[in-house]
Image (cartoon, helix red, strand yellow):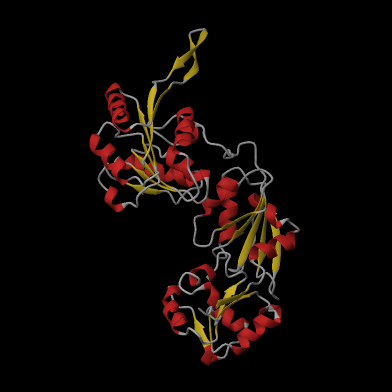
Amino acid sequence: MTAPHPWLTLVGIGEDGLDGLSPAASRAVAQAEILFGGRRHLDLVRAPVDKRRPWPSPLTDAFPEIEARRGRPTVVLASGDPFFHGVGSLIAGFIDPCEILAYPAPSAYALAAARLGWAGQDCVRVTLHGRALERILPHCQPGACLIALSWDGSTPQKLAALLTARGFGRSVLTVLEAMGGPRERVRATLAQDFAFGEVDPLNTIAVEVVADVEARILPLTGGLPDDWFEHDGQISKREVRVLTLSALAPRRGDFLWDVGAGSGSVAIEWMLADPTCHAVAIEENAARAARIARNAAWFGVPDLRILEARAPSGFDSLPPPDAIFIGGGAGDPDVLESCIHRLKAGGRLVVNAVTLETQGDVLAAQGLMGGEVRQLSVSRLEKIGGFHALKPALPIVQWIWEKP
């Protein structure tokens, strides 16, 4: 069987247009019958009118036309590296990579690191393009160097305000505009002093993180302080939460159901474990559901999905999970049965039971299905008159089960 011959070329392009292309990329552009890309990209290569195919909205509407051109010389233009937050992986989803040639240009991340003299491998690279600004917060560690792709010209000012409000106002914020072309401009300021005028929509932001004394720096391990969460008492306490997350064992790309989420603390720490982990917080109380949303945004995981419903109602609308935590509703046999049924094979189920009735249900389930049962007990120092004593919290019976 003969391997497919490349006919589609992905050309990364910078603000220097044709001048920045390699000879091979320039030949591909010159020989293409049709060029797809943003209007700015098409202008940069001075594409003839009859060859121009500006991206429609949504961009994916152009994919059938690209596929229909199989075997004919076609070029797709993209910013920088097409396979780094670019269109490349989308196109490779329907065109065999053996049919594609790619000529990447330096990404905005690479250009920013070069302008600032930063070691690219040591930088945290994030995108705020079409995403909530709060996503940068988990990366705000003292001394960290962050490079962020902007959404538009207003992003730098909004990010500066966010950093200042969260206690990182002395961080050095550098705005790099239209890098690589004649309009390039680089400006730096402290986040708290941000006063730039108009900023080019094509900009990248670099941040050297400096934390003030009052900044709440998210630790790299689990177990966030309880008082950092907004809650009404319905929260898995810090020590119990650490052991619960350990039992849930988040892995890259895993999806969690947090059933009876309360404050959302378990789902939030699950998502903080790795940027690819995602979760849904299932909570029937409207006030608590709104509180979960505020907590998620505060901790930098605004993509936490919130389902305001009484379990197991609403389960049908959710993808099957890799792990389930039941902190509320464990005493309802329908909830437990439905969770066990919907959990993926190899998935982990963790149930925390406080009341004797619920603990009895958990022990009965373990007797039928196996798994591990342990009791968690925590005592904290409290003052009693002029003395002190360790006051025990209510013990929790935890059932940990893995689905065959």
What percent of the width, then of the height, locates residue 192? 64, 49
Point out the residue furthest to the front here: 1
Q: Residue 294, relative to residue 392: is it above or below?
A: below
**Residue at 62 percent of width and 65 percent of height:** 203
Horizontal side of residue 44 vs 151, given as left or right: right
Point out the residue furthest to the right here: 117
Residue 198 visible to the viewer:
no
What percent of the width, then of the height, locates residue 83? 57, 67
Q: Nearer the viewer, residue 225 or 333?
A: 333
Q: In which quadrant of the rendered image does the C terminus lie?
A: top left
Q: Nearer the viewer, residue 323 or 312?
A: 323
Q: Quadrant of residue 13?
A: bottom right
Horizontal side of residue 242 vs 166, given as left or right: left
Figure label count: 0
Residue 110 visible to the viewer:
yes
What percent of the width, then of the height, locates residue 218? 57, 40
Horizontal side of residue 92 vs 371, given as left or right: right
Q: Residue 398, relative to residue 338: is it above or below?
A: above
What percent of the width, then of the height, locates residue 255? 42, 48
**Residue at 44 percent of width and 21 percent of height:** 377
**Residue at 34 percent of width and 25 percent of height:** 354
